[in-house]
Each structure stands twice: as C-alpha cells, then as structure tokens.
Image (cartoon, rainbow, N blue to C red):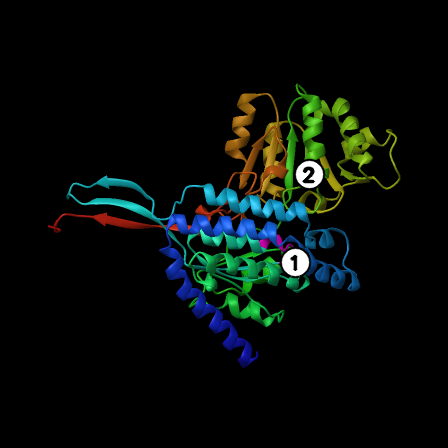
C-alpha cells in the first residue's frame, strides 16, 4: 500500500476526529442554519451539479454501464429537490443531542439517567447514488458527528461537487469544513485503510451491493451498521379490499425496480388465488414483469394469456432472491402461519408487509415477522428514511443491535449514563 495514500488517510482521520469535538458542541441553531444553507445551495448550484453529473454519466456509458446501475448514478432536478427538502426537514426537527431520558432517583439519593450523544466519527462507503453524499452529510451535521465519505469511482465528479457545497454551508455557519470530508481518490486501497482505522472512525456504514457489504463486514476492524440485501415480501391474507391490494402490490413491485425496498416475493393465501392471482398477474405482465411461481400458481396461470418467457416455475433459490429487476417470485401458502414461517426463513429481514382487514392477523404479523420494517396494507417502497419522517437516512440496518431499519439521526447517536448527586457517598 502507498505510504502517500496512508498519510492522506491519516490526515483525513485526524481532521475528522478534531472536527467531531467541535460539531458535537455546536448549538441546535447553528446546525439548523447549516442545513438550511445547504438546502439553498443545492437549489442555487443545480446547473453546476448537473454538469458534474454529466461527466460521470458519460464515463459510465463509455464503460458500458446501463440499466439499474446507470439509473442510480443520475442526478436531476427532482433528485436535488428531494435532497434539499430532506435537509430542510432535518433542520426543522428537534435536536435530540444532549437529551436526557429516564432520570430516576435511587435509594442512595443519586439520580441516574441517560444522555443522547453523538457517536463521534462515522465512515460511509457507498456506490453509484451521489445523492447519498447529501444524505450522509446532512445526518452527520444534525447528529453532531463528523464523517468521512467514500463514494464509488463511477460518481466521483458528482460527489466532489456535492461535498464542496456541504463544506461551504459548514464554513458559512462557523463550523469546521472537515466535519464532512470526501475521500478524493478512487484507489480501492483507501477503503481498506478506512475500515481498519478504529483510531479515527467509530462506526462504518456500507451502502451498496451485496459484494461490497460482505467485504466490508469481513475485513473491518470497526463496528459496521449494514444490510446485505432486500428480499421484501407481501402476503395477501383476504380479498376484502381487492382493488386496494392490487394497487399496493403494483406500486411495491413496479414503481422502481432498483431500490432495496422494492417487492421481490408475493405470498397469497391459496384459497384466494383462483380469483386474485390472474388479476394480479395481468397487471404485472402489463409492466413486463417475469413471474417465477410455485407449482400450484403455475397451474392456475399457465392457461391465462401471457407473453412468452414471463411465466416460469420457481426454484428453491428464487425464494431467497433480491432481483432488483422486473422479476417477482410468487408462492401460494395455506394460511398466515405458513406465510410468517416462509418470510422468517427466506426473507432478508428488511421489509415485509401484509394485506388484510383482519385486525388479529395484522397484529400477529407485526409481532411475529422478524424484520426491520413490518407493514400493514401499504407498499414496501415506503421503507425509507425520508418517507418515515427521519429527514434522510444513511442506510437501512437489518442488524438487531443499536440501529435497526432506516438509520436517521437517532441511529447515529448513542446513550451514555449520567449521574447527578449532591455529595452522596457510597456506604
């Protein structure tokens, strides 16, 4: 590994550690004004940002990048507006840093509680989507943390332009520009150095493909907040609101194929399938979605008019798959018990939903499905920090400790015990 690169990474780490102490004591008003300034700059500098993005898009096309990967790389007015709105939403949210919870007096006379504090420095490693630069930076500012960002080489020009705006907003409001730093090199060794630097970084958050996240998890010497994939399910439990269910499933699968919260597997109670399945299949086929179905579903659909190649018998592996494409697996199940058992076995524990008007079944599904987000009568596409009202998210965690589900401000803080006394001594 290059000594020069190691020196660069050490400089970034030292600057981040120093900045983390300053941003941790920044006032709520200072952080609010920084986020509002960033939102304003995103709108004012749209032309410059889109020009930088065009350089990345041209490079990607030259290297044969297409489909969902190319789509994730694009910036446009709508994406930048969403980023700006996320900054404004975060700015207007209460500042939870320094909040004291659970303060109780003990028999000794001391009062014991917990205070919410920043983690310190987080490292973010992500692919393709340049808007993640803004999501990570805005959450860093709001939560009182410093961060070191390493975006994909395919988005380097977009990320540089966005990071400069973040640093401008920080400087305008008296906060250290090194609160948010972007690794400027595309050298892959930089990632290895970052994830093996507990002296500079307190937590690593990878956001990208399964290969990237598996590598980070295996090699990191720093705690990792992660999810490997999004094999999201929806279970149809009754037909009392059939038109609503059709609309929800259509949205969950076809609104966008590339996100980790897109629907990948549909479960239908078997005694409903004869009526519901052909209607659902017709809608999905109209979008060009390939259906990989169980034997019983194949028997029901093979006599229905469909395009060649859009009806396939599922294999065992299909129940595990995150397709990120116009492909959906479908299985008929006996009842709610089998649906929950199937989801807990095959799901990636990201987001799973039930469509039902049975309150008891809905509550059982909420309690027993072991996933980071569990939903009733709505699209899995809502599993998103912005949609959950977090302002933005830095990723979605399927871990069970500290942060689970969309990781917003609270997921980037921890609790420390505080003790208030008036001269008490232990007997």
Q: Position of residue 343 (x, y in %)?
A: 61, 38
Q: Residue furthest bottom?
A: 3
Q: Position of residue 299 (x, y in %)?
A: 82, 31
On the image, which quarter does residue 53 sit in?
bottom right
For image coordinates 52% across by 39% down, the residue present is 389
On the image, which quarter does residue 152 sit in?
bottom right
For image coordinates 35% across by 55% down, the residue present is 25
Q: Which residue is mark 2?
A: 265
Residue 131 included in the magenta stretch of the image:
yes
Q: Which secondary structure, mark 1?
A: helix
How packed is label 1: few (under 14 Cα within 10 Å), some, or many (20 or more)?
Answer: some
For image coordinates 12% across by 51% down, the residue present is 425
Residue 234 vs 119, above or below: the answer is: above
Instruction: Please indicate whether residue 291 sits to the left or right of residue 216 in the image.
Output: right
Q: Position of residue 141 (x, y in %)?
A: 46, 53
Return the mark for residue 48. Answer: 1
Residue 402 seen in the figure: no
Q: Earlier in the sequence, mark 1 or mark 2?
A: 1
Residue 161 included in the magenta stretch of the image:
no
Q: Which residues are magenta?
A: 127-132
On the image, which quarter does residue 154 sit in?
bottom right
Q: Main secondary structure of the magenta part?
A: loop
Instruction: Please indicate whether residue 266 sits to the left or right of residue 190 in the image.
Output: right
């Amino acid at each position: 590994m290059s000594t020069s690169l190691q020196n660069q990474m050490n400089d970034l780490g030292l600057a981040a550690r120093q900045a983390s102490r300053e941003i941790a004591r920044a006032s709520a008003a200072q952080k609010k004004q920084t986020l509002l300034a960033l939102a304003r700059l995103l709108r004012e500098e749209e032309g410059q940002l889109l020009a930088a993005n065009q350089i990345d898009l041209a490079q990607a096309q030259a290297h044969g990048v297409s489909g969902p990967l190319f789509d994730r790389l694009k910036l446009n007015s709508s994406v930048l507006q969403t980023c700006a709105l996320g900054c404004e939403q975060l700015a207007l949210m209460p500042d939870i840093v320094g909040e004291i919870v659970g303060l109780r007096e003990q028999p000794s006379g001391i009062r014991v509680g917990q205070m919410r504090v920043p983690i310190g420095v987080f490292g973010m490693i992500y692919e393709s989507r340049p808007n993640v630069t803004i999501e990570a930076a805005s959450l860093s500012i709001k939560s009182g943390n410093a961060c070191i960002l390493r975006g994909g080489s395919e988005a380097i020009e977009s990320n540089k332009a966005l990071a400069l705006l973040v640093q401008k907003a920080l400087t305008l409001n008296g906060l250290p520009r090194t609160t948010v730093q972007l690794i400027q090199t595309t050298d892959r060794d930089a990632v290895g150095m970052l994830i093996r630097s507990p002296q500079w970084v307190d937590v690593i958050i990878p956001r990208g493909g399964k290969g990237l996240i598996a590598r980070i998890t295996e090699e990191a010497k720093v705690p990792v907040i992660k999810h490997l994939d999004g094999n999201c399910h929806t279970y149809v439990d009754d037909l009392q609101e059939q038109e609503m269910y059709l609309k929800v499933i259509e949205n969950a699968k076809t609104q966008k194929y590339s996100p980790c919260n897109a629907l990948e597997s549909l479960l239908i109670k078997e005694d409903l399938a004869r009526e519901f399945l052909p209607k659902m299949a017709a809608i999905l086929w109209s979008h060009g979605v390939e259906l990989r179905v169980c034997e019983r579903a194949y028997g029901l659909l093979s006599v229905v008019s469909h395009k060649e190649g859009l009806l396939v018998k599922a294999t065992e592996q299909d129940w595990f798959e995150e397709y990120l494409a116009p492909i959906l697996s479908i299985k008929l199940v006996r009842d709610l018990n089998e649906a929950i058992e199937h989801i807990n076995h095959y799901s990636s524990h990201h987001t799973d939903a039930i469509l039902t008007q049975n309150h008891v079944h809905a509550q059982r599904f909420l309690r027993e499905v072991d996933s980071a987000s569990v939903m009733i009568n709505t699209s899995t596409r809502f599993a998103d920090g912005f949609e959950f009202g977090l302002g933005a998210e830095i990723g979605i965690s399927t871990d069970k400790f500290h942060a689970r589900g969309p990781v917003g401000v609270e997921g980037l803080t921890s609790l420390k015990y505080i003790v208030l006394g008036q001269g008490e001594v232990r007997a």
